[in-house]
Amino acid sequence: MRGIDAEIDQFFQEGINEVMSEMERAGQAAVQHNVENGDYKNRTGRLRRSNYYRVSPEELEIGNSAPYASDVESRGYMVCSEGALLAEQMLNAGN
């Protein structure tokens, strides 16, 4: 009976690994999109360098750690929202 438990555990672990791999790919694409398409003046480079993603089995987090990123985005400039939408589309489409 122990063998079947190990097989089931392996099956679920493979599924988790697949999902995390897809979230990793979507996170990388989101950050790349945000870096390449941010439509604000890049005075210091900090906003572009501060784009990030984090993957865990429960979630994909996409953001920008610059303390003024949300202020810039609230003024109508694209800092990280488009990349987050791109990642969501990628994950929903299964691409």
Image: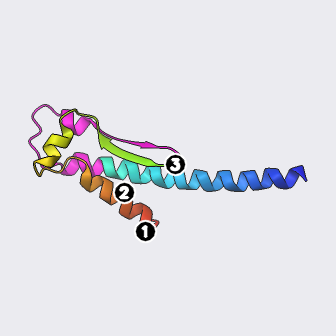
Single out the mark in the foreground, 3 or 1. 3
N-term-proximal mark, 2 vs 3:
3
Image check: 74 left or right of 87?
Answer: left
Say which residue appears at 28% left-offset and 35% top-offset: 65
Q: 10 Å neighbourhood of mark 2: few (<14), some, or many (≥20)?
A: many
Amino acid at circle 1? Ala
Asked if the residue under mark 2 is in contact with the one under mark 1, i.e. CB atoms within 8 Å, the reply is: no
Amino acid at circle 2? Ala
Instruction: Tell me the tag on residue 93.
Output: 1
Residue 21, x across and y down, in percent: 51, 51
Single out the mark in the foreground, 2 or 3. 3
Which region shows up in magenta?
32-57
| Residue 50 among those drawn in magenta | yes
Residue 25, x across and y down, in percent: 43, 52
> Label 2: which residue?
87
Q: 10 Å neighbourhood of mark 3: few (<14), some, or many (≥20)?
A: few
Amino acid at circle 3? Glu
Residue 39, x across and y down, in percent: 13, 50
Say which residue appears at 17% left-offset and 51% top-offset: 78
Q: Quadrant of residue 42?
A: top left
Image color mode: rainbow
Say which residue appears at 17% left-offset and 35% top-offset: 68
> Label 3: which residue?
58
